[in-house]
Image (tube, grey):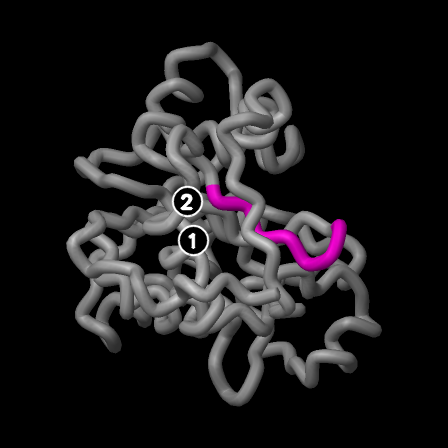
Amino acid sequence: MTNPGIQSATPTIRVAVLLLAAGEGSRLGGYPKALLKKDGQTLLERLVVSTQSMAPIEFVVVTGFYAKAIENEIDRLNRAHDLVIKTYQNPHPEKGQSSSIRLGLESLQSVFDVLLVALSDQPEIGHLEISELLGGFTNRPPGTQIVLPMVGNQRGNPVLFSRGAVDEILATTQMVCRSYMDANPALIYRLHTSRQAFIQDVDTAQDISKYQLTKS
C-alpha cells in the first residue's frame, strides 16, 4: 500500500544524493549500466532529472569501471541541466559496492538533512518514487533515521539516510550503509509501497529487452 503521506514532503529538507556507478556490468558483457538508454536518455540522466524536484544541495557520483565514459556523461549533464554533479573515482572497484559507498560518504561536503543513496541500474525510478521516499522521511515514526522502500517482503532502492545516521556510519571505520542497517534495525522505517520500480534493476541482457533499453 502506498504511503498516504507522499504529498507532504517539504522542499525545506536539505537533500544530498549519492549515486553508485562503479560497477563492471560483467553480466552485460562488460558495459556500464548507467549509460544504458531508455526513451533516448541514459539511466544516469533519468535519475538526475528525477531528483531535481528535490533541489539537491549536493550530488555525488562514484565511478570505477568505465570511469571516463561516465564522467563524460556527467560533464554533458552538468552543461545541459546547469548542475554541479561531482564525481569521485573508486581506485579499487573490484572490492565491491561497499568500497564505493564508503568513498561516496566520505566525499560528501554539504550540510544536508537527508541523503538519498541510489543505484545506477534502476530504469523505472522516477519523480513519483523519489517523492514517495521524501514523504516517507517527513512522516517517518519518531526515532527512525532510515527510509527503506519495501515491495511485499523485498527490500528496494533508493534508500534515505538522515544526517545523523550518516555521521554514525562515518564514525566507524569501514562501516557502510548496509552493515549499519543490519546493526540498527530499530532505526529503519520500512515504507511499504506497491511501486515495482523500487525493486527493478538491470543485471542481464534479458533485462535490457525487458525494460526496452538500448546501448549508447
Mark 1 lies on residue: 136
Front position in the image: 38 or 147: 147
Whether label 1 touches label 2, CB < 8 Å: yes
Is residue 152 shown in magenta?
yes
Where residue 143 appears, x then y in whole percent?
40, 29
Residue drawn at the location 18% of the way across and 70% of the way down: 82
Is residue 156 shown in magenta?
no
In the rendered structure, the answer to whether residue 89 lies left or right of residue 78 reads right
Residue drawn at the location 83% of the way across and 73% of the way down: 206
Residue drawn at the location 80% of the way across and 71% of the way down: 205
Quadrant in the picture for the N terminus? bottom right
Mark 2 lies on residue: 140
Residue 69 shows up from this direction: yes
- Examine the rendered structure and indicate whether residue 82 appears above or below residue 149: below
- In the image, the segment drawn in magenta is 147-153
In the rendered structure, the answer to whether residue 125 lies left or right of residue 145 reads right
